[in-house]
Amino acid sequence: MKHGLVWVFGPIAATIVLFHTSGAGAADIAPHRALYSMSLGQTHGDAGVTGAGGTMAYQWGESCDGWTVEQRYRLKMGYAESADVSIASNFVTWEARDGLRYRFNQKETRNGADNDEIRGEAKLDGPDKGGAVEFEKPQPKSLKLPAGVLFPSAHTIFLIDKAQAGENFISRQIFDGATVENSVLVSAVIGAKVEPDADSAKKSPLLNRPGWRVRLAFFPADQKAEKPDYELGMLLLDNGVSRDMVIDYGEYSIRAKLDDIEALPKPGC
């Protein structure tokens, strides 16, 4: 489940979380720090999952030259026929405002034991062009990125721009560095506009914004795959904040509920 939680906003971790350049869109992103509680959603068939619980902290910051994202989560999964598994992950990225450069570093532990660290850098040759990614860890590895591939923050910004323009379906290749694989196809279905409600507005001005119900399907790198690895549903606001999320793995789903949020300062460039 690494990939789904990492992308959620951006996290994985968007993010997160469909564009041309991260600085060219109309979306006015609000840098923020948010805390979510995670729990088991629905189960289907013989999932074997009996419980899930944890927390996720997400920070989307803005600098003069780009976007910084840090997503940390701790999740304990319960299973009917095997021991519980405790997962802790820290995923940190930097993405250039023009959408052409991207650095990523992920560390994860399972039951206290370190998994392989993933770290590297990706560059594109220009807007809507291909590029390359250089992995430093877990071992040196190079991959060519296809033309039109997007990085996570730019993907979210473009998604908001397209939602504001009234589009309902968008599909693009996304690279996030959450695995040592190449980019994945992400298809987005955008629902009707949702106006802010009074209760949310009382919690924070960041939540007093309109948004859209969005459903993202993440397909594997194998172009022949007909079914997505997982789907992500969320209420995405026009400032980049996600009020709630459901990560659907088919046999079970994980819910993420927003508990707390605070604004971060914009750079004085």
Image (cartoon, rainbow, N blue to C red):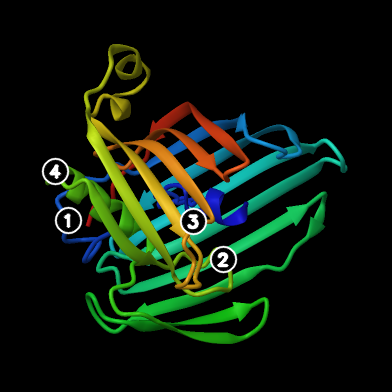
Is residue 190 found left or right of 264 in the rendered image?
Answer: left
Distance (Cα) linking label 1 and label 4 = 15 Å
Q: Position of residue 15 (x, y in %)?
A: 45, 50
Question: Can you identify the residue that label 2 sits on?
Answer: 105
Is residue 237 shown above or below 152?
A: above
Is residue 31 shown above or below 175?
A: above
Question: Can you identify the residue that label 4 sits on?
Answer: 166
Outermost residue, left side: 165
What SS does tag 2 mark?
Answer: strand
Looking at the image, tell me whether mark 1 or mark 4 is earlier in sequence order: 1
Front-lying residue, 112 or 214? 214
Residue density around tag 3, few if under 14, some if 14–19, many if 20 or more, within 10 Å: some
**Callout in the foreground (4, 3):** 3
What SS does tag 1 mark?
Answer: loop
- Disc 4 residue type (three-letter): Gly
Question: Can you identify the residue that label 3 sits on?
Answer: 228
Distance (Cα) linking label 3 and label 1 = 28 Å
- Disc 3 residue type (three-letter): Pro
User: Which disc is residue 25 wearing?
Assistant: 1
Is residue 30 shown above or below 143?
A: above
User: Which disc is residue 137 wearing?
Assistant: none
Distance (Cα) linking label 1 and label 2 = 26 Å
Q: Would you say the residues marked 3 and 2 are in contact, meaning their CB atoms lie under 8 Å apart?
A: no
- Disc 2 residue type (three-letter): Asn
- Disc 1 residue type (three-letter): Gly
Q: Position of residue 73 (x, y in %)?
A: 62, 44
**Callout in the foreground (2, 4):** 4
Q: Residue at x 20, y 44 (%)?
A: 163
Q: Would you say the residues marked 1 and 4 are in contact, meaning their CB atoms lie under 8 Å apart?
A: no
What SS does tag 4 mark?
Answer: loop
Q: Position of residue 103 (x, y in %)?
A: 46, 70
